[in-house]
Image: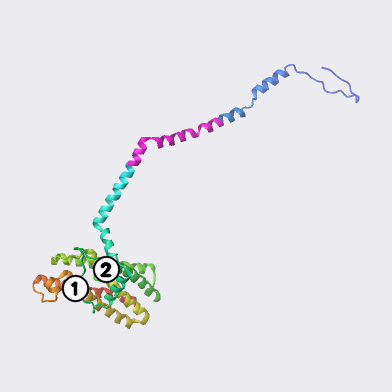
Amino acid sequence: MDYTPTQSGFRQQPNMRLRNSSVDGVEGSQLFEDMSGAAHGLQTGNQQAGPQPAGFSGQSILSDPMSNLAMAYGSSLASQGREMVDKNLDRFIPISKLKYYFAVDTMYVGKKLGLLVFPYMHENWEVSYQQDTPVAPRFDVNAPDLYIPAMGFITYVLVAGLALGTQNRFSPELLGVQASSALVWLIMEVLAVLLSLYLVTVNTDLTTIDLLAFSGYKYVGMIVGVVAGLLFGRPAYYLSLLWCCAAIFFFMIRTLRLKLLSEAAAEGRLVRGTRNQLRMYLTMSIAAAQPIFMYWLTYHLIR
């Protein structure tokens, strides 16, 4: 140790030299070596290697012939299922035949509405045919259609909602009950007519869609009666409904007798035979049911 005197008389601390200072520095540097570089390199390597399996698996799936075969097989099954559904649907609901009943135009709709309200001056009630096929409704006013019954049903529900609203009785539930009850009565009427035709054993070209069309024509008179009652009161409702009931009764008699009765009865000659009499009673019963339904579905709408 060396002591060096100072001017103030105090002595400084001794300068001690360590022999192994250089060795300890080297060992310290090796012991606490910075590992951040290695860790960063390892992390970078993992990031580069990470996406490779995902990309490889996606390419393998796309390039796998088995997956392509499965996709082709699935598409073929879907197409076959769609064809099967179309065939079964056409069996129960003939979509191709429904197009015939909606082949109407503005002139036909106007003439048919006039015929439903005032049928007394109409003379020819036979449906026109072309090569054993009835012509489209737009070419023959006597042909049945579904456009007027469908629009009549929707308009009847709307008019019923309007009538309930003017009486402060409107509610979505009540309007739904009104629409569902009208639809249920229509279905029950068609089913009853089909059952009657089966029991009477009538050979006719009337189809279920024809019966649905003829039964749906009464909505026109119902709309006229309710609108007249809303505008002019209850007496106007009864008068207009009475007129429309008589018109639909006459319309149904003149239309159905050509479909249900024999040729002699259709020409107006005397009907003889039990079977022909049953057909005549059935025709009159179908026609008489229309005014009953018209009154039943509208009388509570006018107060």
Q: Residue at x 29, y 72 (%)?
A: 219
Q: Residue at x 34, y 39 (%)?
A: 70
22 vs 134, left or right, is right
The image quarter in which residue 295 lies: bottom left
Marks 1, 2: nearer the viewer: 2
The answer to whether the residue labelled 1 contacts the one labelled 2, judged by CB atoms less than 8 Å apart, is no
201 vs 289, left or right, is left
Q: Is residue 25 depicted above or below 167 in this figure? A: above
Q: Which residues are magenta?
A: 43-72
Residue 283 seen by the camera: yes
Element type where label 2 sits in the image:
helix
The image quarter in which residue 287 lies: bottom left
Instruction: Measure how far apart labels 1 and 2 are at the Cα level.
Output: 30 Å
x%, y% of residue 56?
Answer: 45, 33
Q: Residue at x 30, y 69 (%)?
A: 148
301 vs 263, left or right, is right
Colour scheme: rainbow
Residue 185 seen by the camera: no
Q: Residue furthest left?
A: 273
Q: Which residue is mark 2?
A: 139
Q: Is residue 29 depicted above or below 233 in this figure? A: above
x%, y% of residue 253?
Answer: 20, 74
Amino acid of disc 1: Ser
State the mark number for residue 118. Answer: none
Count neighbours of disc 1 (C-alpha within 10 A) and say few if under 14, some if 14 to 19, many if 20 or more. Answer: some
The image quarter in which residue 185 lies: bottom left
Mark 1 vs 2, N-terminal side: 2
Q: Which residue is mark 1?
A: 285
Q: Residue furthest bottom?
A: 235
Amino acid of disc 2: Phe
